[in-house]
Image (spheres, coloured by chain):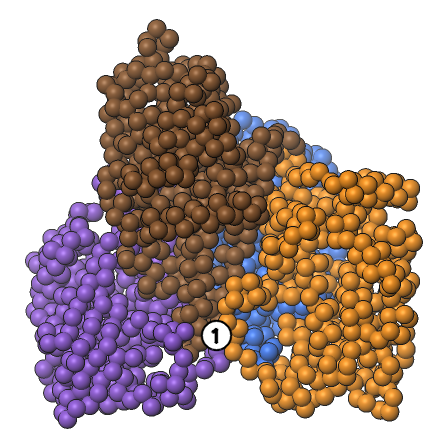
Chain colours: A purple, B orange, C blue, D brown
Amino acid sequence: MQRSDTPEQAEFRTEVREWLEAHAEPRKGEGDWSNGPREHTPEAEAAYFERCREWQRTRFDGGFACITWPEKYGGRGGTPVQEIIYGQEEAHFDVTAGFLPASISLVGPALMRHGSVEQCKRYLRPLMRGEETWCQLFSEPDAGSDLAAVRTRAERDGDEFVVNGQKLWTTSAQHCDYGILLARTNAEAPKHAGITFLLVDMKIPGIEVRPLITMKGDRHFNEVFFTDVRVDVANVCGEIDRGWAVAKTTLANESMMIGTGTQTQGTTASLVQYAMDHGRWEDPLVRQRVAEAYVQERLLGFLRDRLQEAVLEGRMPDVDGSVMKILWSESRTLRAEVGLDIQGTDGLLAGDDAFDHAYWQQLVLDRSMGSVGGGTLEVHRNGIGERVLGLAREPRADRDVAFRDLKTSTEG
Amino acid sequence: MQRSDTPEQAEFRTEVREWLEAHAEPRKGEGDWSNGPREHTPEAEAAYFERCREWQRTRFDGGFACITWPEKYGGRGGTPVQEIIYGQEEAHFDVTAGFLPASISLVGPALMRHGSVEQCKRYLRPLMRGEETWCQLFSEPDAGSDLAAVRTRAERDGDEFVVNGQKLWTTSAQHCDYGILLARTNAEAPKHAGITFLLVDMKIPGIEVRPLITMKGDRHFNEVFFTDVRVDVANVCGEIDRGWAVAKTTLANESMMIGTGTQTQGTTASLVQYAMDHGRWEDPLVRQRVAEAYVQERLLGFLRDRLQEAVLEGRMPDVDGSVMKILWSESRTLRAEVGLDIQGTDGLLAGDDAFDHAYWQQLVLDRSMGSVGGGTLEVHRNGIGERVLGLAREPRADRDVAFRDLKTSTEG
Amino acid sequence: MAFILSEEQAEFRDTLRRFFSETTPSDDVRRLMDTAEGYDASVWSTMAEELGLQGVPFDERHGGQGFGLDELCIVAGELGRALVPCPYFASVVLAGGVLKHVASEAQREALLPRIASGAVATLALVEPGQGRWDATSIRMETPPEADDGRLTGIKDVVLDGTTAEIILVVTRSPGSRGWEGLSVHWLEAPIEGMQPKALQPMDATRKLARLHFNGARSQVLGQPGEAGPALQVALDEALVALCAEMVGGMEFVHESAVDYARSRHQFGRPIGSFQAIKHKCADVQIDLEGARAAICAARDAAGSDEFPLLASIAKAHCSDAYYRATQENVQIHGGVGFTWEYDAHLYLRRAKSSQQLLGDADQHRERIARTLEAHA
Amino acid sequence: MAFILSEEQAEFRDTLRRFFSETTPSDDVRRLMDTAEGYDASVWSTMAEELGLQGVPFDERHGGQGFGLDELCIVAGELGRALVPCPYFASVVLAGGVLKHVASEAQREALLPRIASGAVATLALVEPGQGRWDATSIRMETPPEADDGRLTGIKDVVLDGTTAEIILVVTRSPGSRGWEGLSVHWLEAPIEGMQPKALQPMDATRKLARLHFNGARSQVLGQPGEAGPALQVALDEALVALCAEMVGGMEFVHESAVDYARSRHQFGRPIGSFQAIKHKCADVQIDLEGARAAICAARDAAGSDEFPLLASIAKAHCSDAYYRATQENVQIHGGVGFTWEYDAHLYLRRAKSSQQLLGDADQHRERIARTLEAHA
């Protein structure tokens, strides 16, 4: 849908486009570097991460990183409208900052809202410029959907906390300089009330990062082990034992981002071409399924357009983040399944023997990540029921009980 | 699947067949009276009910009602194998006792197990012979899936209870002579502990039966209102305040029966004929859906065969009743939808203008009854999770609390 | 339909919602659906005379209000929400839309003002044995020019076909195929050579008839044999209005299910606190947000090349989404949901019949696929 | 497969379960799937020599154990449960089944004892560009009789095609169609005029190859041009064994998901107490009971007229049921479920590839429909 820009919007769009043309190559297709590392080797993944950092720096220096952040913190002080326009234009170029914008918008708001003046001064600019990269040390083996069940301990010892425990599902930890850490500082308090939010240098002794290989073979996630890691109390963000409030600032943005990311690869149109080339298009069942996948994909697009349009027109968006996330995940799943199924026996193959370098096989394996990462679909359905529709929450067994008295899996 | 009978089984089968040939007409087709009342008028429904009673009496007098019940209560003292063989043979004849066998096997076991000697003597024979018919007065407006939440009060007054309240979803109450009633006799006790199981004459003053018309237009269910109805304490079945145990004997059989009833009408084969006659069969989508419905129907049949075979061979059945119930309901739903959808615009019609006298339209409307009646599908899924798979129950807010202190819808 | 309305549009919607809840509460819906004509003549004329609803999509020079598809969708949404039994869809949306796009200016001037002031019109398209709402498989033949437009044949499932006075009939030139060679005829009922026969509808809030033509005289709208493209535009606009009507109903059953899940207690808790119920409600919410967005996207693309595709996307989604919502509503209500006296089944019947109206989801997915093929 | 076994059968199953858990634990599965040949030769020969597994379905005079489809299903079920990478399915089920039904007695005497004692065999059926496992669309031509059975063409996704020494190839007589005119050829690899090329499989526990034929000499099994009916029987039996293998895997992932739902706590409760998880488990249980019943029904009907129909019913159901079970297993396990080191994805890959093997659910539903049509 083409909207007509206001004169200010058109002017900004031209500025962005000219800057992009000067600093980037136009998008060409599947082979673009910005589509992700071509191989699942540590080297290829590290090289890709470096290119992402580089582009983040270029963006920042051009004044197009963190467009909506206040100028006093180094942002552009711009509007969500400008952010959307920038995104629309950038999508035509072979550039990406990969996981960095997501990581930046998890860490930045938490720092700006809850951090000390010193912390903001020290960390924000290198964060925004991609000079220092950050990972999120929240999930644990026993704290998945139930994120507040963190067991990693931070015990006070003079001016320091001594951290012991294990984190899980830490995206890109192997490439990061710093981390935001949730640790339990008071096991006598109820679950949500004894957690502290710490800023941690990932290079200090006692931190061990072990990449976790996912079912499709990449190293997106890591386990991070803490053994007697000493963190200065100056690195507490917010207040001691009140870290859950800081974490919530971070979590508020997360599901929204996963649900709204632009999906340029693997659109249904390429399925039509495949089916026509392989003589499958004359099968009405194939046409039905491709059309079904296409409908889902367009619905998601319509909702995204609505969301952006609302922002561009200065209205409150009337599309819920969890709705977007579930539709995104389901439409992706449907497309993956249809894409693989119409290949028939060719779908049994992998690697270079498979169509599109096994893109569709990877997408099928990836679907689970889409329906668990960023909150499981079940958690988001609860969210829609409770937040949007006002249905009652489940009775909770884990409120008002000291954390150490709660039942956990490891005792089960 | 054809099994070969043992000599004893073959002998019994011959006996049954000869008796049936002497007492009934062979099944002819859709127009058989045993397929249910042709019209949804009170008269047609009452006439149908009378014919069902008559057949129950004939069966009993022939020695084929309540085949597995002990001889001392008037049963045949036979085996489940004989029960199955009888059912297989009866299916070839245009006869039915309608809702009576279901009602009999709800009331009978409760009486035999928990009733007094006098109660058994007084009620069992007329029950089995269809002379006195019984309805189940369990559900209430606020006690649906949560059956133990009954609010109908029975207050002690000398040798009598005075009953006040309302029952709902009482099958065939308008045709019945007696009812089994769950009433609250102690509101200070926890929910399950203050209920009494009463045998009630439906003709005594203060009982008002109002038929409820279902969405497809029949009078299957009723509301029953109790106003100062006096019931002698001699009519308590089991112990006062301990009626939940009696009710559980009754409920154990209910879902199984609904799930295993033989379905002779509307099988998928007739859809094939319809589609071929109307030029829809050459649509591969139609063929896929009919085949899908057929697969579901056969799966259910396989499971029913397994169940019967297990009984015939003297093994414990390894098929769960809730699994049968859900598959029954889902396969019926699928068949109904496919049956209506392949009619295209003809499916918009009703009554005599519609194909098969709107059989498929009725089936679509009836599907909801199949997925709510006899326990909602959700309740049965809980049952499979908890009983079959050993998953934990939901935390319960309604145990160990006096009934009068519980939250209910009417206060909500 | 509650999705990005201007202030005036929101006010218009609120007015309609009040009007229908006052003039056509559930009891009246049930009373009207048992009558032969199926609507309340006095409400219908108030709609035309006081609210001008029957003129919403027509130009002012045709006695209309000069509004667009947006406002038509608002009216359809409120009619669907309150399940108002009346010939609005047949008369204004279908016949009115076809007249707008197919008829000559003189014919529009003659007919649209009548529809705007409450005359009932309809479109006869489907034929018996055809089984689908599909203009391309029409077989009834356009009579030769010398023949005074005498029509022969049968049209089936004609909405409000026994009450309509203006009847539009689609025929095809012998030997033509697909969207080629179609003509739309106009005749005034009652007329010699046409017998209407009322059909029993599963959804009694929308009346159906079979029309037997046996030499009834008619006039051709616009140019004979050339109605195809304009007819397609009219049907696509009707498709979007139908989707809006469906979403109106969907919103109602969704609100009703959510309210019940909030207030009904079992096992000492509101049933909406159980995930099985909560997730059903969430899924309907997702379907609903998708449906609204699809309708808005189609509506905004009216007149563009993408309009037919977007109209089909909306129908492919809304068909199943509305029906699913009505089923979940019944299921969440448990026993209450399947009684005759509770309204859930009226919406379920409407949703089921709306699946077929103007083509089911399979047909629209096929059309979407063929459009993608053309662009591949 | 745990569904109505005799005492001997249950003991046989338990023996196999112990054997595979000792000889092929998960670590070995992972090690073997990274090798070119894809199986452990010493385990394979123990299976043949000590347990006699490769001879299960063959007559004693052919070096077999003289068991029926029941026992073959038990073996397949345990192989599927432990995900044992080995050429059992290709060799014993597919090639062995085809030999049993298609070959002459002399050929059976020559070949079956070799398979029973561990020689690897396979069946080459699918062709590139065909896209489906479907004997009726084979195009590779049966060479003229004078031509020494010299084969030309390409066969695709041949199971264990690089390791097999006995290779059976299906061809058709020029001009024939459907199940008519099919021949099965036998050749011994390696052989001049045939190049095998290993393909990378998505499910690395089952090796695939493409075979290029360029004049390789072969012998026809049984009568040339008349293999169709017997081949169909063999493929239907293989279908049931495949379903048993799938149900073996399904039972494993179901148990694994239920165990996790019992022991994993979140929000102070076992996650299995949440309805969203509990109902997923219940749905898999329903699917599983249906799958077991379908296999038993098909197995018991072996040799009867209804067998092909029941075999297709089993595959139509198991295809989707197994895949769904592996997805739910991943979903219930949450993050753990999609790590490389956790076995969930190995079963998911196996389930996904098994959907295609011997025809996907669509193909079998089409076959079911055509069977119903024939009886209508």
Quadrant the C terminus of chain C occupies: top left
Answer above or below: position of D345 versus D195.
below
Residue positioned 46% across, 17% down in the render: D104
Q: Position of residue C315 (x, y in %)?
A: 49, 52
What amino acid is found at the position of numbered circle 1 in the picture?
Leu
> From where the camera sits, is residue B360 visible?
no
Q: How many marks?
A: 1
Left or right of B353 on screen, residue A409 = left
Q: Disc 1 on helix, strand or loop?
A: loop
Q: Nearer the viewer, residue D141 or D255?
A: D255
Residue positioned 68% across, 38% down in the render: B2
Answer above or below: position of B268 versus B389.
above
Residue lying furthest top? D146
Q: How many residues crowd mark 1 within 10 Å: few (<14), some (14–19), many (20+)?
A: many
Left or right of D125 on screen, residue A211 = left
Q: Which residue in the protein does label 1 denote?
A: A389
Residue positioned 82% across, 57% down in the render: B77
Q: Nearer the viewer, residue A302 or C344?
A: C344
Residue positioned 16% across, 70% down in the render: A208
